[in-house]
Amino acid sequence: MRPHTGSFSWWLVDRVSCLLDESEREVVCGDLAECGSRPGRALREVLGLLVRRQAALWLDWQPWFAVLSAVVPIGLLLSHASRSWGVILGIDLANYWVLWDFSYLAYPGYRNDVIHLVVWTGTCWVALVGWSWMCGFVVGQFSRRTLWLTLSMFALVVFVGTWGKVPMRQWNPSLQYHLVVVVAPRMVRAFLVILPMVLGAYRGRRGSTLSLLPTALGVLLMAGATIVVSQAFENSVFFPRDPGPDGFVISEDDPRPWWPLSFVMMWPAAYILATTVVHRWREKRVLA
Amino acid sequence: MQLGEFEYLMLTAAARLGDEAYGLAIRQEIEVATGRQCSLGALYTTLDRLELKGLIKTWMGDPTPQRGGRPKRMVRVTAKGEQAAAAFYAAVMRVSRGVTWATK
């Protein structure tokens, strides 16, 4: 754009212009260089064009479908699940960090507890990663040209979806409490939700279909993980009626059913499997 | 073919510039003629619309040094575009006949 001026403003203009299509970016940057625009005006010009381009894309139904059927509902559920399981993970890690002793493994009860924790945590992680990746995949397919905006929305929903669920009056300023309630859920969200979602979105945007066998096995695995961990949604995720002492993990007497949530989480899996099967069937027909 | 005022301005500027018609030159032509600022957003979204209607044809020109080695988006008014602009101009002339500002 203006290679001789290495100012922050021009760097910002350059970064923002990257959100335009490659050919349009070249033309616009060339125009700005030729007319000797000031960085402030250049930024306004690029942002103006970007807003118009995005607005035009949102006249289509696909981005809205991606947001309303995946980004918001699945993002909210993942926000609650990642927070709940992040806190549990933080508590377990803190406990084992303080109390861990290899000699305890000689006791069957302790050993079983460790095995149960590893299996349960692993299943939860598989579920989180799988749901996020599949959600990303369908968002990538339906929202190809608005992907950076829908991904930003998803990150926002995941990170702010549980705001207000921890009463501040119970806030404990100790470092351990901070690690458990704040840091652990954020790490879980960043690495087990946002990262797989972004990877899935870019895979979905590429448009090429997945192989049938790995897809079917992946969907089966996710269905199993969903059945196992969905029970953890009960009470702890949806509209807690009576928050417990830490304001998040609550009592077990809430009669509201948890099973419909699995449909919300698993529809991307059903979509991916269906589109893969249809694509393979069409391929076979063409070859035949 | 229905044209808007800004679309007419763009077609006219592109026709006036002839072989030298490209995005930035059209913008400067419009700004000089109207005394109003024209944003790149309005310029390029309108160019797309006109191309979609078949009133202009655009293509990437050669890169030039004063543009930092980046190409121009060249513009040419099609025959359909000329007809649409002529119809718009004729309508403005007809409707303006006899009004005070047209006879000054």
Image (cartoon, coloured by chain):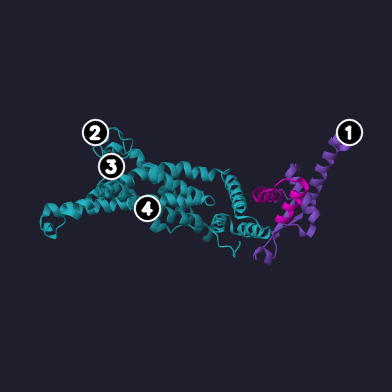
Question: Which label lies toward us, 3 or 1?
Answer: 1
User: Which residue bears the numbered disc 4?
Assistant: A190
Is the same chain shared between marks 2 and 4? Answer: yes
The label on residue A253 is 2
Q: In what element is the residue under mark 3?
A: helix
> Bounds of the magenta span?
B23-50
Question: Which label lies toward us, 3 or 4?
Answer: 4
Residue A111: percent from left, percent from top: 15, 55
The image shows residue A215, relative to residue B9, as above or below, that is below
The image shows residue B77, relative to residue B98, as above or below, that is below
Q: Colour of chain A?
A: cyan
Which is more toward the observer, A182 or A84? A182
**Do the numbered discs 3 and 4 sit on residues whose CB atoms are within 8 Å?**
no
User: Of the residues under marks 2 and 3, which one precedes in the sequence?
Assistant: 3
The amino acid pointed to by label 3 is Gln
Chain letter of the residue beneath label 3 in the structure image: A
User: Which residue bears the numbered disc 3?
Assistant: A231
Which is more toward the observer, A120 or A9? A9
Q: CA distance from mark 3 to mark 1?
A: 80 Å
Is the same chain shared between marks 1 and 2? Answer: no
Q: Which chain is purple?
A: B
User: Of the residues under marks 2 and 4, which one precedes in the sequence?
Assistant: 4
User: Of the residues under marks 3 and 4, which one precedes in the sequence?
Assistant: 4
Residue A198: percent from left, percent from top: 44, 54
> Is B29 part of what is drawn in magenta?
yes
Which is more toward the observer, B102 or A227? B102
Chain letter of the residue beneath label 2 in the structure image: A
Q: In what element is the residue under mark 2?
A: loop
Residue A139: percent from left, percent from top: 47, 49
The amino acid pointed to by label 4 is Ala
> Is A124 part of what is drawn in magenta?
no
